[in-house]
Image (cartoon, helix red, strand yellow):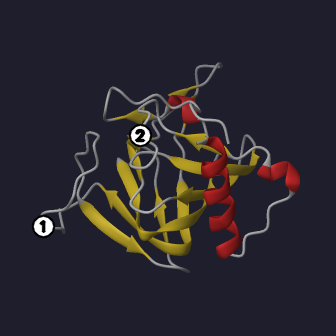
Amino acid sequence: MVGIVESRHRNAFERAHIALTDEEKGRVEVADFGLNDLEQIGLQLVIYINTERVCSKEMVLFPHQTCPEHRHPDLIGADGAKVRGKQETFRCRAGEVELFVSGERNVGDIALPPTDVTVFHRVLLRPGEQYTLYPDTLHWFRAGAEGAVVSEFSTMSRDETDIFTDPRIVRTPEVGA
C-alpha cells in the first residue's frame, strides 16, 4: 500500500509540473485522519516552510478524496496573548477542487463524504484559481474526478490545534509515505 500511495502522489506532483527535491519527496506526509480509509478521506502533503509567520505546502488529493471539515481557531499563547488562527489561501494547480465553506448553501443534493460535514457553500477551484480562508472558518474540500494538486500559502500552520467537526478525526500521520 505504501509504495502505491507514494507512486500516486509523486505522479500527481509531476503531472502538475511541481518539482520536489529528493529531500522533500522523502518527507511527504500521508494523512488518513485516523480513519484508515485513504481512498475517500485523506490527503498527501509536503511542507516547504512553516515558521512563526508563514507556511507553504503542496497537497495532493486523489480522485474524490476529501479533507474533512475543520477550522483553525484562535489560540492563547504562552504569554496569555491571543494568537490568531491560521489564514490560508488555496491555489489549484491541477484538477478541480470543491471547497465547502460557511455561507448560504449553493448546492443541491451532493454525494457526502463518510465524515460529519455541516457547511455547503461550494467554491469550485480550477487550475490557476484561488480562494482565501480567514481564521476560524469552517471548511472541507475534495478533489474532482481527476484528483487535484493544491498549493497552500498561509500564516503559521498548527495542524495539531485544528478542530474537526467529526470527533473520530485524528490529525496525525497514520500512513507512511
The residue where tag 1 is placed is 108
Q: Report which residue position mark 2 lands on.
A: 37
Where disc 1 sits, the SS reads loop
At horizontal 29% and vertical 66% (from top left) the residue drawn is 122
Marks 1 and 2, how far apart in space?
A: 26 Å
Q: Position of residue 148 (x, y in %)?
A: 51, 67
Q: Is residue 109 above or below residue 31?
A: below
Name the amino acid type tagged 1.
Answer: Gly
Circle 2 — which element? Answer: loop
Instruction: Decide: is 134 above or below 143.
Output: above
| Residue 36 quadrant | top left
Point out residue 173 in the picture as x, y percentages from the top left corner. 59, 33
- Quadrant of image for the C terminus: top right
Quick one: quadrant of the N terminus? top right
Q: In the image, is residue 97 above or below residue 102?
A: below
Mark 2 residue crowding within 10 angstroms, few (<14) / some (14–19) / many (20+):
few
In the image, which disc is placed on residue 67? none
